[in-house]
Image (cartoon, grey):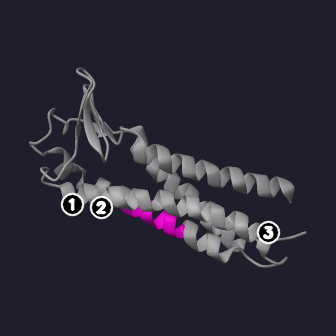
């Protein structure tokens, strides 16, 4: 049982780390001489970064992605704290339902963020406000990490739902 508990804790911490990296790092959309995320656009040639502000046409879509990724990360961290609290407070045989619900909310938020970015990426990167030609790029590793974090949070949410506290 101790090995299972250690695996669950490591899995949850890994999910949170993936969410932090994909939210913060500047690699959602990359090209030869630029990289962009949901916060800023950076030119790799000149090392100049420009924040994405309300002057961009698709700023509302970017804000939705930002909010969903932040919520997902917060839910994942709160879910871990609730799991630790429930670990010591639940009676034997009870399920970690609250932890599961919080983790599934995190899963839903990251899915919404990645789905919005996937759906709106053409409009997002054709904006004339960018300092570089960002439409000629491809998805970066932060975007991929967001989808992997979706899978991890979904799996851990289901794990918590079926997990019972045993001796």
Q: Residues within 10 Å of mark 2 (few under 14, many from 20)?
A: some
Q: CA distance from mark 3 to mark 2?
A: 36 Å
Which label number is shown at residue 64?
2
The alpha-carbon separation of the residues under discs 1 and 3 comes to: 42 Å
Looking at the image, is mark 1 or mark 3 nearer the viewer?
Answer: 3
In the picture, the quarter occupied by the N terminus is bottom right
Q: How many marks?
A: 3
Is the residue under label 3 in contact with that under label 1 (CB below 8 Å)? no
Is 83 on the left-hand or right-hand side of 143?
right
The residue positioned farthest toward the right in the image shown: 167
Which residue has dot 1 on it? Answer: 60
Residue lying farthest top? 45
Where, by quadrant of the figure, is residue 80 drawn? bottom right
Q: Quadrant of residue 162?
A: bottom right
The structure residue drawn at horizontal position 83% and vertical position 53%, both measured from the top left corner, is 3
Of the residues under marks 1 and 3, which one precedes in the sequence? 1
Task: From this view, report whether residue 146 is shown above or below residue 36.
Answer: below
Q: Please, is residue 47 above or below residue 160 in the view?
A: above
Q: Work out whether mark 3 precedes mark 2 in sequence or the reverse, and give the earlier one.
A: 2
Residue marked by disc 3: 88
Q: Are marks 1 and 2 in contact (CB under 8 Å)?
A: yes
Residue 167 position in % (x across, y down): 91, 69
Q: SS class of the residue under badge 3?
A: helix
The residue stretch that appears in magenta: 104-112
Tell us which disc is closer to us: 3 or 2: 3
Residue drawn at x 41%, y 39% is: 25
């Amino acid at each position: 049982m101790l090995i299972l508990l250690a695996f669950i804790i490591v899995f949850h911490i890994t999910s949170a780390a993936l969410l932090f990296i994909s939210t913060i790092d500047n690699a959602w959309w990359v090209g030869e001489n630029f990289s962009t995320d949901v916060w800023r656009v950076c030119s790799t040639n000149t090392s100049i970064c420009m924040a994405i502000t309300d002057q961009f046409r698709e700023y509302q879509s970017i804000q939705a992605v930002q909010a969903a990724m932040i919520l997902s990360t917060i839910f994942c961290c709160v879910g871990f704290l609730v799991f630790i609290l429930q670990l010591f407070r639940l009676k034997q045989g009870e399920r970690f339902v609250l932890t599961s619900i919080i983790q599934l909310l995190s899963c839903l938020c990251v899915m919404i963020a990645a789905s919005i970015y996937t759906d709106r990426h053409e409009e997002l990167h054709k904006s004339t406000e960018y300092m570089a030609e960002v439409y000629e790029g491809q998805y970066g590793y932060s975007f991929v990490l967001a989808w992997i974090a979706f899978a991890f949070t979904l799996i851990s949410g289901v794990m918590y739902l079926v997990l019972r506290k045993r001796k």
